[in-house]
Amino acid sequence: MTRAIAGTDAAGGNYGDYSGGEAKSDPGLIFATVYPFHLFGLFMQTLHQFQTTFEQYLAENEFSRPPIELYGPVDYIFSLGGKRLRPTMLLLGHFLFDENFEKSLPAAFAIEVFHNFTLVHDDIMDAAPLRRGKPTVHVKYGLNAGILSGDVMLVLAYDYLMKVQSSRLPEVIRIFTRTATEVCEGQQMDMNFETRQDVSIEEYLKMIELKTSVLVAGALEMGALLGGASADDARLLYEFGRNLGIAFQLQDDLLDAFGNPLKFGKKTGGDIAQNKKTWLYLKALEAATPTLADTLRSLYSSPAMDEAGKIEQVLTIFNQLNIKDLAEEKKEKFRLAAIGALAHLNAAEAKKNMLENFANALMNREM
C-alpha cells in the first residue's frame, strides 16, 4: 500500500521512514552501506554514541506493566529493533548546539515511540504479515490489540515529551504535533494515489515530503531547539532534513529502476512491478506523446503480464524520454537546497561539515 524509502519485510512500506535499507544489528553500521569510511569516521563515532546512549535509555524504559495485553505488543514492536534514525537525528540536532545531548533523551524516545506507532498501524492497513522477518503486531496479538496498542503509543509519546526539562518545551510540542499530523496526511495521500489516475508530480513530491521527510526534519528541529538553537537556526536544520529526505526518495526511485541490485540491495524494477506511481512514472507521463503515455498507463494496469517483460518495456520508455537524467536533475535541486540550509546555520563548521559529507554520501549511492 504505502510508498516508503526504507525497505522492510512487510508487504508495504512505512510512513514516516527514510533510512536506506535493512536494519543492522550493530547501531554503528546505520549508514555503513552508503557513507564511505574515509568520510564518516567522526560522524559514525558520534552516531554510535547517540545510538548506544539511546538504546540504554530504551532498555530502561520498557513498558512491562499491566494490562500485558495492552503493553506487551508495545514492548514487542521495540524488540524487533531498527535503525533508531529519528531519535538519533534529534540527539544530533541537540549536539550541534550543545554537546550535553542526554537532556533530550525523553524527546528522542517520544519521537521513536511515535514512529513505531505508525509502523503498527501501517502494518494493519497493509495487512502485512511480517516486519523485519517477524510477525507483525496485529498478526501476533490480534487486530484489536494492534489498534489499541498503537493508540496508547501515541499517548505515551506525548507523555515522554512532557518529561523534557526545557523552557522550549511548548515550541517542541507544537513541532511534534504538526509533524505527527503531517505524517498522517502523507499516508492518506499515498493511499489515495493507489486508486487515482491523475496524480501530479507536485502532489507526489508533497506526499513524500509529508510521509517520509518531515519526521526526520522535525526531529532535527526539535533537537536543535532543546540544544539552545534560535528558532531560525532550528528551522534551517529542519529545511536541511526536509530537502535531504525528498532528494533521498528521488534517489531511491532512480536506484529501484536503474540501480545495480547487488549494490542497492533490492531487485531492479520492483516499483514498476508493483505499479507504484513514482516520480519517474509521473514524469514519463508528462513527457510522453499521448500514444506513448497510453502505452505506459496500460503497462501499469496489467499486473498479470510477465513481470520481467513489463519492467523491460517500462524502462525502455523511461530511457526513450531521458527520465533518468531528468530525475537526477531534480534530485540535485533538493540536495543543493539541503546544503544551502546548512550554509546559513550558526553552528560549528566541523559539525556542519559532518552533515554535508553525510548528505553528499547519501546521494552518491552507486547505480
Image (cartoon, rainbow, N blue to C red):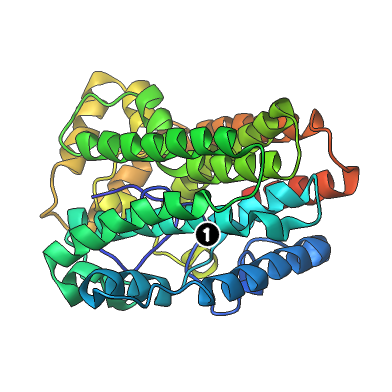
Report the amino acid beneath label 1.
Answer: Phe
- The residue singled out by tag 1 in the image is 109
Q: Is residue 86 visible to the viewer in this orientation of the structure?
A: yes
At 78% from the left and 57% from the top, the residue drawn is 100
Left or right of 354 in this view: 54: left
325 vs 319, nearest the viewer: 325
Left or right of 30 in this view: 151: left
66 vs 109, nearest the viewer: 66
Left or right of 224 in this view: 256: left
Q: Is residue 13 above or below residue 243?
A: below
Q: Is residue 331 visible to the viewer in this orientation of the structure?
A: no
At 34% from the left and 36% from the top, the residue drawn is 186
At 52% from the left and 31% from the top, the residue drawn is 326
11 vs 279, nearest the viewer: 11
How many numbered marks are there?
A: 1
Q: Is residue 179 above or below residue 350?
A: above
Q: Position of residue 256 (x, y in %)?
A: 43, 53
327 vs 148, nearest the viewer: 148
Q: Position of residue 4 (x, y in %)?
A: 38, 50
Q: Position of residue 219 (x, y in %)?
A: 57, 46
Q: Quadrant of residue 346?
A: top right
